[in-house]
Image: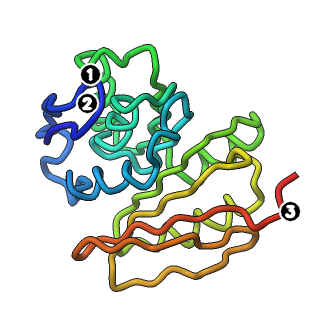
Amino acid sequence: MRITGGRARGRRIKVKAAIESSSLRPTASKVREALFNIIGTDIVGARFLDLYAGTGAVGFEALSRGAEEVVFVEINPIRCRVIKRLAQNLGFKNRIKVYKIDAFNYLLRTKKRKEVFDFIFIDPPYQSGEIMKILPLLSDGLILSRDGIIIVEHFSKIALPEEIGNLKTRKTYKYGDTSLTTYKFTEGVQG
């Protein structure tokens, strides 16, 4: 896999160790490029949360395109080590944090620490049901910045709800079997 844009454009991400003997489905470069076309220049200086980070490709793309910091959340210890090694190789070591924990518990802890992100990317295994476990946890607005966006990668044949708590769908973009659905807070909800 290669980074599709920004400072590290064209740099190869070697992920063989992260995907061997697993059902990992890395985000395709076409979808990553589309994701950052949606975000645009707002990525510059942003804090980006990559839940279910897998190979870390999406988070590294965010860093390459100017994100200030990326937090990778991944339960698999091998993948966590791969992400740390790639960050070192790409020159992003000082702009990342890697947590070996499941996404749900990470979010519970983060709320207590009152950390805030500009972008939250959610890409669990397609058939896992994790999306409907995570989105309600984010609907209170405690860890998303005022103008922040939640982006969910999911199987195109599964339609996500238009509203979940205080979150409202902005738009769904379809790329073959993959869709990206964006959520924002409804007006006047966040304090």
Q: Is residue 68 above or below residue 77?
A: above
| Residue at the (59%, 65%) spot, across then down | 183
Q: Is residue 113 left or right of residue 120?
A: right
The residue at which mark 3 appears reads as 188
Residue 13: percent from the left, percent from the top? Answer: 17, 33
Q: Is residue 170 above or below residue 51?
A: below
Q: Quadrant of the N terminus?
A: top left
At label 1, the amino acid type is Arg
| Coloring basis for residues | rainbow
CA distance separating discs 1 and 2: 5 Å
| Residue at the (25%, 20%) spot, across then down | 90
The residue at which mark 1 appears reads as 85
Counting residues from the N terminus, which is met first, the one under dot 3 or under dot 2?
2
Label 2: element kind = helix
Residue 56: percent from the left, percent from the top? Answer: 32, 39
How packed mark 3 is, by other alpha carbons closer than 10 Å (few <14, some 14-19, many 20 or more), is few
| Residue at the (76%, 37%) spot, across then down | 114
Residue 136: percent from the left, percent from the top? Answer: 67, 67
Label 1: element kind = helix
Disc number for residue 82: 2
